[in-house]
Image: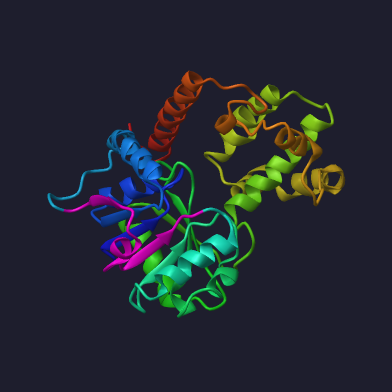
């Protein structure tokens, strides 16, 4: 079983991933080229640990489950049995990382990408022994959401997929193994289909952003947290789905480009929380409040879904 894990890249996801892996008893080395990213990740660890405590994830045995930070790549990957690449969503950047570590890791070291949707088959072209490369797509925030997608590329060895699936299960998390390597994998394909429709509805003046957030969160989102979409088909009935989809599918958004609403926001620098202005406005205090509120609600929902008090 894998015991030594390296995380390359400590952006939004890295600290939560490191905290969750360490809580599972693994020895984690967390690397970033930027000192500021390392400092930020260190500062986030306490909050992630507190959330894991609230979830009832038991601490590991004494001496197990550590996180060490470094900005030295050779030091970071030395002795690693699993390297999780978590750098920006750009094939060229990822390829540079794979080339940089190729001579520093053992031929048997598994290299997993936390890419949100770049096909693993494309990434395998940039590493020796592509059979050891696999997709390991965590969902944000990674220390709270238990589902992790596992994606094999065309050259991924079955034992590589099995090793990651077993690791995820050993942590008490939920591996979802894809049978095909498709762009966006499954979670983001479903999410972006929904986002395409809601952006289209706002752009067409059908509804205001805050109202569609209420509609989705307290309507379909509320149901889907308890009943999966395929089970929902059975619950509603195939006859009902057939009837509604026979006329509604033709009217749903199916654009292949990026919606003008999004392009306009981008051009104006309104990127969302990261810029303090998007469809909504955000002060630093509001951002911190939203982060605390998100964590609290996600923990509460997860405990209910797991049958915990």
Q: Can residue 213 be seen in this view?
A: yes
Say whether residue 79 is magenta.
Answer: yes
Q: Does the magenta stretch include residue 153?
A: no
Q: In which quarter of the image is residue 274?
A: top right
Which segment did they paint magenta?
64-87
**Residue 224 vs residue 146, the one in the foreground:** 146
Q: In which quarter of the image is residue 7?
A: bottom left
The image shows residue 58 at horizontal and vertical percentages of: 23, 43
Expressed as whole percent of the image width and height from the top left, the position of residue 203 reads 81, 32
**Residue 289 located left or right of residue 169:** right
Residue at 53% x, 39% y is 225
Residue 305: image quadrant is top left
The residue shown at (45%, 41%) is 141
- Front-most of residues 40 and 52: 40
Residue 192: image x %, image y %?
A: 67, 46
Query: Where's residue 297, x and y in %?
Result: 44, 29
């Amino acid at each position: 079983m894998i015991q030594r894990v390296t995380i390359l890249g400590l952006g939004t996801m890295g600290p939560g991933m490191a905290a969750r892996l360490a809580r599972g008893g693994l020895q984690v080395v967390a690397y970033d080229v930027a000192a500021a990213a390392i400092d930020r990740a260190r500062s986030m660890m306490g909050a992630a640990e507190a959330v894991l405590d609230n979830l009832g994830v038991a601490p590991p045995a004494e001496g197990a489950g550590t996180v060490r930070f470094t900005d030295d790549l050779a030091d970071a990957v030395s002795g690693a049995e699993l390297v999780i690449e978590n750098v920006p969503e750009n094939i060229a950047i990822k390829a540079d990382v794979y080339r940089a570590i190729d001579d520093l890791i053992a031929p048997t070291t598994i290299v997993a990408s936390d890419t949100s949707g770049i096909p693993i088959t494309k990434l395998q072209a940039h590493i020796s022994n592509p059979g050891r490369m696999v997709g390991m797509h965590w969902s944000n925030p990674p220390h709270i959401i238990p589902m992790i997608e596992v994606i094999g590329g065309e050259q991924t060895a079955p034992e590589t997929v099995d090793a990651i699936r077993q690791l995820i299960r050993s942590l008490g998390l939920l591996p979802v193994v894809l049978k095909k390597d498709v762009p966006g994998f499954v979670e983001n394909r479903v999410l972006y289909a929904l986002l395409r429709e809601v952006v289209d509805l706002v752009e067409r003046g059908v509804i205001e952003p805050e109202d569609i957030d209420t509609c989705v969160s307290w309507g379909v989102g509320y149901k889907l947290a308890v009943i999966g979409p395929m089970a929902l088909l059975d619950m509603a009935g195939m006859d009902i789905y057939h009837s509604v989809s026979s006329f509604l599918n033709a009217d749903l958004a199916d654009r292949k480009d990026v919606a003008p609403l999004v392009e306009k926001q981008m051009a104006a620098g309104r990127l969302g929380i990261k810029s303090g202005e998007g469809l909504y406005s955000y002060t630093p205090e509001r951002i911190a409040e939203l982060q605390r509120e998100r964590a609290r609600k996600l923990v509460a929902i997860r405990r209910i879904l797991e049958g915990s008090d």
